[in-house]
Amino acid sequence: MPLTRILVADDEESMRWVLSKALKRKGFSVDLASDGRQALSMIQDGSYDLAILDIKMPGITGLDLLDKIREQKKDLLVVIMTAEASMKNAVEAMKRGAYDYITKPFDLDVIDAIIEKVGRAREVAGQVSMLKQELKERYQVEKNIIGNSPVMREVYKTIGKVAGSDVTVLVQGESGTGKELVARAVHFNSGRLGKPFVAINCAAIPKELLESELFGSEKGAFTGSVERKLGKFEQANLGTLFLDEIGDMPLDLQAKILRVLQEREVTRTGGNQSIPVDVRIVAATNQALAEKVRLKEFREDLFYRLNVVPINLVPLRERREDIPLLVQYFLNRVCAEMDIPLKQCTDETIALLTGYPWPGNVRELENAIKRAVILSNDLLLTPADFHGLESAPGMELTVSQEASLEALVDSKLRSCLQGIEHLENGEIHSIVLQQVERPLIRIILEKTRWNQVKAADILGINRNTLRKKISELGIELKRD
Ligand SMILES: Nc1ncnc2c1ncn2[C@@H]1O[C@H](COP(=O)(O)OP(=O)(O)OP(=O)(O)O)[C@@H](O)[C@H]1O
Ligand SMILES: [Mg+2]
């Protein structure tokens, strides 16, 4: 917040002239008022950083003006000019909240010194207000991450543990599980609070632009680059760089990122100078990075560099106890934002929301609540306000569930098969299928309370086939 606009108010023309000349020469923009009333209206309309007021002016005196400024423009700094005879007034001025006073006649050096002091004060004030803002955000981040499940409590602990250091954090989780929220929490709870948090979504930026977005570019580096551009690494200097959707980073850029992390310097596109950068990296992905490493789609060395501290966000359907808390939190937030009376969910609605699998996780839940709050005319939200959810067949697998199931089975099978020394020809297929089929049928039977008709429907197989499988697989039938 540099000092730029100054108002000088004095009924003596020569004084206005001298001050205006001296201040303008220093590059400030200066406005002049010849009495208190004029000064007041200029202050009310304009945005000054500093007002230099004569204490004795016709209309409103400098002191009365000072009172009005303290009421109406709390941030405006005021310097009062007094004649030697009125030192008493100078004390009075300070009491009423003037920043400083000058006794007339004065040397221009005095003005210089005051201006410099004001500049420093504004800088500190700027830092303080920035810090206040950041602290507010830090507080909000803590309030913002909702969830009391054991897995979420582990997440909070990890955020706390990494707060004091610069270790790289890799946040993994399905879409909408709160990866960005966690990345921000890591930053705002760290020593880098007050420094920039810069996010870049590697999946959203075309490959050919990503490099210069990350590392910057020199003027003329390519057609159309008319100016030097700072990359995200430089923008995040001293702060945190959030590399979102890192799994989508092209391989050649992965190599460059790795180099930056190792050498802690960047070279802008089209440049040859190395610029030191000091950034803390938090990366996030909704893809199984370890699997991408295996498929050679993600560099192993970069993976290990990023994955120093992993934070895995569990899908919402696996921490259903957090759902009622989140529902309440979003109801409060949405209603407050819309400035309407608080709406609530009936118990039946909470049960519906808690049972739904939420493939889009917390984001989907948040949107569903927003939509229901906006569309319903009642203060009580019923299942009917959540269209689509009630008809969702509880046992159907979503695309993302299917994908994660396959990944899970894949990795389990791999490790099981590795341990087996030699396989008999023609056995493996039926052994593995039985091992998968048995728990599947058992789980569905449990869920349907051993109702074989329902279980067969959900499984999508004939009732006789189910009966045959139950006996072939040796599934023990229970009744609730
Ligand atoms: N635990 C939580 N408490 C409160 N709000 C949450 C929580 N988790 C996520 N949200 C909210 O859900 C939305 C999605 O979160 P966020 O953007 O952090 O998810 P993400 O994992 O980065 O998703 P994507 O992979 O789609 O980018 C945001 O509005 C966020 O505020
Ligand atoms: Mg995200």
Image (spheres, rainbow, N blue to C red):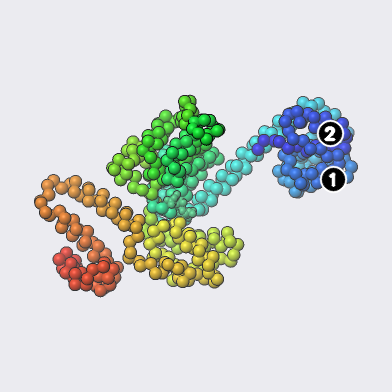
Separation (CA) of disc 1 from disc 2: 16 Å
Position of residue 203 relative to residue 480, above or below, is above
Numbered marks: total: 2
Report whether the residue tagged 1 is closer than 8 Å to ligand 1: no
Secondary element under disc 2, as helix, strand or loop, is: helix
Left or right of 395? Residue 261 is right
Q: Quadrant of residue 87?
A: top right
Q: What quarter of the picture does the C terminus occupy?
A: bottom left
Residue lying at the far front in this picture: please name it. 223
State whether residue 231 appears in this view.
yes
At x 42%, y 57%, the residue is: 361
At x 38%, y 62%, the residue is: 357
Where does residue 138 sit, x and y in percent of width and height?
A: 53, 47
State whether residue 166 appears in this view.
no
Look at label 2 and name its amino acid: Arg
Query: If you read the primary sequence from the N terminus, does the residue marked by circle 1 or circle 2 appear first?
Result: 2
Label 1 crowd bin: few (<14), some (14–19), many (20+), radius 10 Å: some
Between 479 and 387, the one nearer to me in the picture: 387
Where does residue 273 sit, x and y in percent of width and height?
A: 48, 25
At x 15%, y 58%, the residue is: 430
Look at label 1 and name its amino acid: Arg
User: Which residue does the numbered mark 2 point to in the structure image?
Assistant: 16
The reply to whether callout 1 and callout 2 are in contact (CB within 8 Å) is no
Position of residue 163 relative to residue 336, above or below, is above
Left or right of 259? Residue 213 is right
Q: What quarter of the picture does the N terminus occupy?
A: top right
Secondary element under disc 1, as helix, strand or loop, is: helix
Where does residue 113 sit, x and y in percent of width and height?
A: 74, 29
User: Which residue does the numbered mark 1 point to in the structure image?
Assistant: 37
